[in-house]
Image (cartoon, grey):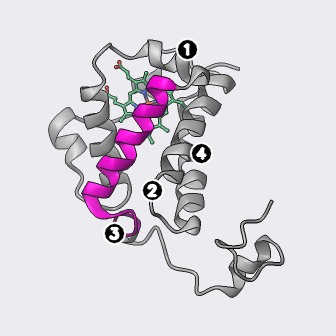
Amino acid sequence: MVDNNEFPEGDDLSGVKKRNVPVFGQGNSTLVAAGGEAGVQQLVTDFYHYIDSLPEAATIRAMHSDDLSESRQKLATFLIGWMGGEDRYVERYGRMNLAGAHRHMAIGQDEKQAWLMCMQKALDAQPYDELLKRFIMVQLSFPAEMCRNRN
Ligand code: HEM
């Protein structure tokens, strides 16, 4: 179902092509569009709210420690660098190998989908352009697939 507020051209998703499409993914443009570091902190706070409360995410929630603050901090620091901001992850936590960092957890299709669903809901809670939300979801689907280690 097409949201005519997001797509005022009204016909179908091809309407996005007629818009003045912003450029994401160059330099720190994604980070800026996401509200800077404070915007990413909010995104991650909302993401972990969904991890913590949605029944679909219960398996992922159980993989974390009771206190989510360190996970929140690590993911926000990682995403800030990933969006073209300062790369403080390596400074603070050492080199990051996503697949390696997730190897000790059983991540299959269901866990990957649940993770991405929480991220979609968190994005939907932000005052972002619809195109930015889609860009981030598409881009995150690659590392999410790298984290999957079973069917
Ligand atoms: C595919 C589904 C995913 C699941 C189920 C998942 C689950 C988890 C869990 C449970 C932890 C905490 C591990 C611990 O406390 O020992 C974690 C850590 C982390 N995850 Fe994921 N994750 C997923 C995808 C991703 C993606 C796509 C990214 C980045 C774009 C990411 C970035 C991170 C980072 C940076 C950490 C902290 C690693 C560390 O330094 O210990 N994860 N993940």
Q: Amino acid at mark 4?
A: Ser
- Does the beta carbon at disc 4 come under 8 Å from ligand 1? no
Dominant SS in magenta: helix
| Point 83% across, 78% down: residue | 11
Residue contact between numbered discs 4 and 2, judged by CB atoms under 8 Å:
no
Whole-angstrom CA distance, mark 3 to mark 2, is: 14 Å
Task: Measuring from the top left, give residue 53's x and y in whole percent.
Answer: 49, 24
Q: Which residue is mark 3?
A: 32
SS for dot 2 = loop
Q: Residues within 10 Å of mark 2 (few under 14, many from 20)?
A: some
| Point 74% across, 83% down: residue | 9
Task: Identify the residue at the far front of this view.
Answer: 5
Nearer the N terminus, badge 3 or badge 2?
3
Whole-angstrom CA distance, mark 2 to mark 1, is: 30 Å
Whole-angstrom CA distance, mark 1 to mark 3, is: 34 Å
Q: Which residue is mark 2?
A: 126
Nearer the N terminus, badge 2 or badge 1?
1
Task: Measuring from the top left, give residue 126's x and y in whole percent.
Answer: 45, 56
- Residue 141 numbered tag: 4
Question: Does residue 80 appear to the left or right of 108 in the view shown?
Answer: left
Q: Of tags 4 and 3, which is closer to the observer?
A: 3
Nearer the N terminus, badge 4 or badge 2?
2
Question: Does residue 72 appear to the left or right of 110 in the view shown?
Answer: left
| Point 49% across, 15% down: residue | 105
SS for dot 1 = loop
Which quadrant contains ligand 1? top left
Task: Measuring from the top left, give residue 17's x and y in whole percent.
Answer: 71, 81
The answer to if 46 sits in the magenta stretch is: yes
